[in-house]
């Protein structure tokens, strides 16, 4: 007999809490009751048919605090039917990957009616998030109790509640037992080893697992560069111009590693089922606004915003602002070179040990200023991209990433290009690259992981002390967990993590031929980065909702673009080298043709790798 959603029980007395909804403190009772009914009502009647209860009962609210916290869960059958609805792909008994269906559930590997582990907790939370987001207005014209919060048929209720400030946040709970097991195999013991990528995927989902998989792969890919670079650096310490061999290896390395990654990425995501998972129809992003109308594609009533207005905002406001920021970045760079000239002149006049140390101060100050400018620009880019009013989240992310990458690339690498191809000072290029790379790594580790972890530990101590002071005859374990987690910062995605790797890849691939230790420092940084990022995911931020991913998205294109730029840069450096120029003392035309041929050969090699893949 076919099981339908209408046969499910939404009034189970106990269930495993998976997701927490926090309401504002002054939310009206009629609004709470309406939201509860929409969550537990049967699907055929417009509900989500999930399990829902307050975190605290009436007595506990009086004993502790009047927290507007609610727990959401689902029965096993509801989750399985939800897995079918979202199109989760699972491995069958015949080793093929297929979209899960409840009717053929016994054909899938690992399924058993008594087994609750067929769906990972991350998948269960993803299903609940999907069902909550698909709660849509029917006949309601407004949210009960809030006449100003207008609704129209088809509008996502959760998004409207969030934008109205009625719902403060929705987040998935940690599984403390599973989290402890993951930590023990991941980062608590500092050893050089492979990460438990499959376990990370089961707990955090594919998007997070792919980031850590790429971080691990990139770190191992840096090892050949580090191994070759260390003796190369030691033996030609003062010979700044003898970099032709290392530059040749560098341009081949930067091309090949990305093609190998794409193969490994496809293998992982096929095993996880996301490579063949059908892409769901993308809903308008929460911040999208416009005049209500009928979407000609979906037939739904939703806000409509003319594309020409968005283009005007992009080309008349966003683009000039980005260009102004790029100009300001170049202005700051010229101030840095003035400081370098001042420090060098002071050292030449005095020649003391103090002035020799002073030579590194301008680069350190400039590296700090670069990090500050990058972060300030990031906020401005986010504001501008939101103001452009993109309909889809993917379009928003693409425009944001483009803005941030262009500025970060110029801000971080313009001085290096200027030193290499205008000043042609390889000694200064080596010193500047070393200072920028090491300083940025130290700052990123401190700001992204260590400082947030210290602040979170301090808050945990305060909350636990407050709970111990309460004389409540109740089991406050779950209450303590929810209260601690709701105060954690929200993980905003892998954007900053990929950006850090992107800039690191640029430092290594573009100019490491003049500073071969760059790869070695990058390896050391990434070995600690794995542990600090793992700590950040497990103990600093709320658990993020799982998001199925088939690859690293637009970042693959970003890294490939950097790879092409590195090929051109290394070919140009080879053409500038005294060794190559000595081979063609009379004809620069032959030299230019050879450099172009080398660059073309590298591009053809890259193209062949893509075809073979």
Image (tube, rainbow, N blue to C red):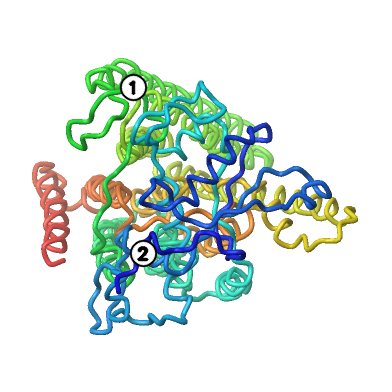
- Foreground residue among 190 and 335: 190
- Foreground residue among 576 and 476: 476
- Foreground residue among 203 and 302: 302
Q: Which mark is drawn over residue 309?
A: none
Q: Is residue 599 above or below residue 148?
A: below
- Name the secondary structure under disc 1: loop
**Image location (x, y in percent) of residue 545:** 47, 54
Q: Is residue 419 visible?
A: no
Q: Residue at image x 53%, y 74%?
A: 192
Q: Is residue 597 visible?
A: yes
Q: Which residue is mark 2?
A: 81
**Image location (x, y in percent) of residue 211:** 42, 58
- Name the secondary structure under disc 2: helix
Q: Residue at image x 38%, y 25%?
A: 326
Q: CA distance from mark 1 to mark 2?
A: 35 Å
Which badge, 1 or 2, is on the more N-terminal residue?
2
Q: Are marks 1 and 2 in contact (CB under 8 Å)?
A: no
Rate crowding at label 1 as few (under 14), some (14 to 19) or many (20 or more) other CA atoms within 10 Å.
few
Q: Quadrant of residue 285?
A: top left
Report the side of 608 relative to 558 (left or right).
left
**Image location (x, y in percent) of residue 125:** 48, 59
Q: Residue at image x 48%, y 76%?
A: 116
**Image location (x, y in percent) of residue 163:** 49, 31
**Image quarter (top left, top right, bottom left or bottom right) of the C terminus:** bottom left
Q: Is residue 137 above or below residue 259?
A: above
Q: Which mark is drawn over residue 290?
A: 1
**Image quarter (top left, top right, bottom left or bottom right) of the N terminus:** bottom left
Report the side of 15 relative to 593 (left or right).
right
């Amino acid at each position: 007999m076919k099981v339908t959603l209408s046969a499910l029980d939404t009034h189970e007395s106990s269930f495993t809490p998976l997701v927490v909804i926090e309401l504002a403190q002054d939310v009206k009772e009629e609004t709470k009751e309406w939201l509860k009914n929409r969550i537990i009502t049967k699907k055929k009647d417009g509900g989500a048919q999930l399990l829902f209860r307050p975190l605290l009962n009436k007595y506990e609210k009086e004993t502790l605090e009047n927290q507007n916290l609610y727990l959401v869960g689902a029965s096993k059958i509801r989750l399985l039917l939800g897995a079918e609805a979202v199109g989760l792909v699972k491995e069958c008994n015949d080793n093929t990957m297929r979209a899960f269906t409840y009717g053929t559930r016994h054909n899938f590997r690992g399924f058993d009616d008594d087994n609750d582990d067929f769906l990972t907790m991350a998948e269960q939370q993803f299903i609940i998030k999907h069902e909550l987001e698909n709660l849509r207005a029917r006949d309601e014209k407004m949210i009960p109790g809030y006449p100003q919060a207008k609704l129209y048929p088809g509008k996502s209720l959760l998004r409207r509640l969030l934008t109205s400030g009625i719902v403060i946040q929705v987040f998935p709970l940690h599984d403390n037992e599973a989290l402890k097991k993951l930590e023990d195999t991941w980062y608590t013991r500092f050893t050089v080893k492979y990460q438990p990528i499959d376990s990370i995927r089961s707990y955090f989902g594919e998007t997070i697992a792919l980031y850590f998989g790429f971080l691990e792969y990139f770190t191992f890919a840096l090892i050949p560069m580090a191994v070759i670079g260390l003796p190369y650096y030691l033996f030609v310490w003062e010979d700044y111009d003898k970099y032709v061999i290392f530059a040749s290896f560098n341009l081949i390395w930067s091309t090949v590693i990305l093609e190998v990654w794409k193969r490994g990425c496809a293998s992982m995501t096929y095993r996880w089922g996301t490579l063949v998972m059908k892409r769901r129809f993308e809903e308008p992003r929460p911040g999208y606004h416009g005049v209500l109308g009928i979407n000609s594609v979906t037939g739904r009533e939703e806000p409509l915003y003319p594309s020409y207005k968005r283009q005007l905002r992009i080309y008349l406001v966003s683009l000039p602002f980005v260009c102004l920021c790029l100009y300001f970045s170049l202005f700051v760079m010229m101030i840095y070179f003035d400081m370098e000239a001042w420090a060098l002149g002071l050292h030449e006049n005095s020649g003391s040990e103090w002035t020799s140390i002073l030579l590194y101060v301008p680069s350190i100050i400039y590296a700090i200023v670069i990090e500050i400018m990058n972060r300030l620009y990031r906020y401005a880019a986010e504001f501008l991209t939101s103001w452009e009013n993109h309909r889809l989240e993917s379009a928003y992310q693409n425009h944001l990433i483009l803005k941030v990458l262009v500025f970060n690339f110029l801000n971080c690498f313009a001085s290096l290009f200027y030193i290499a191809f205008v000043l042609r000072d390889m000694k200064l290029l080596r010193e500047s690259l070393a200072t920028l790379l090491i300083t940025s790594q130290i700052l990123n580790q401190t700001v992204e992981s260590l400082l947030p972890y210290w602040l979170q530990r301090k808050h945990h101590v305060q909350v636990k002390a407050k709970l111990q002071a309460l004389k409540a005859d109740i089991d406050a374990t779950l209450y303590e967990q929810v209260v601690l987690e709701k105060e954690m910062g929200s993980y905003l995605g892998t954007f900053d993590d990929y950006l850090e790797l992107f800039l690191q890849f640029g430092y290594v691939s573009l100019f490491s031929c003049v500073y071969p230790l760059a790869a070695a420092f990058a390896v050391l940084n990434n070995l600690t980065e794995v542990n600090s990022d793992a700590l950040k995911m497990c103990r600093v931020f709320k658990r993020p909702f799982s998001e199925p991913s088939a690859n690293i998205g637009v970042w693959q294109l970003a890294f490939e673009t950097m790879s092409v730029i590195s090929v051109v840069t290394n070919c140009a450096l080879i053409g500038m080298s005294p060794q190559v120029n000595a081979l063609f003392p009379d004809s620069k035309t032959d030299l230019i043709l050879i450099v172009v041929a080398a660059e073309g050969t590298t591009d053809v090699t890259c193209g062949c790798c893509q075809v073979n893949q």
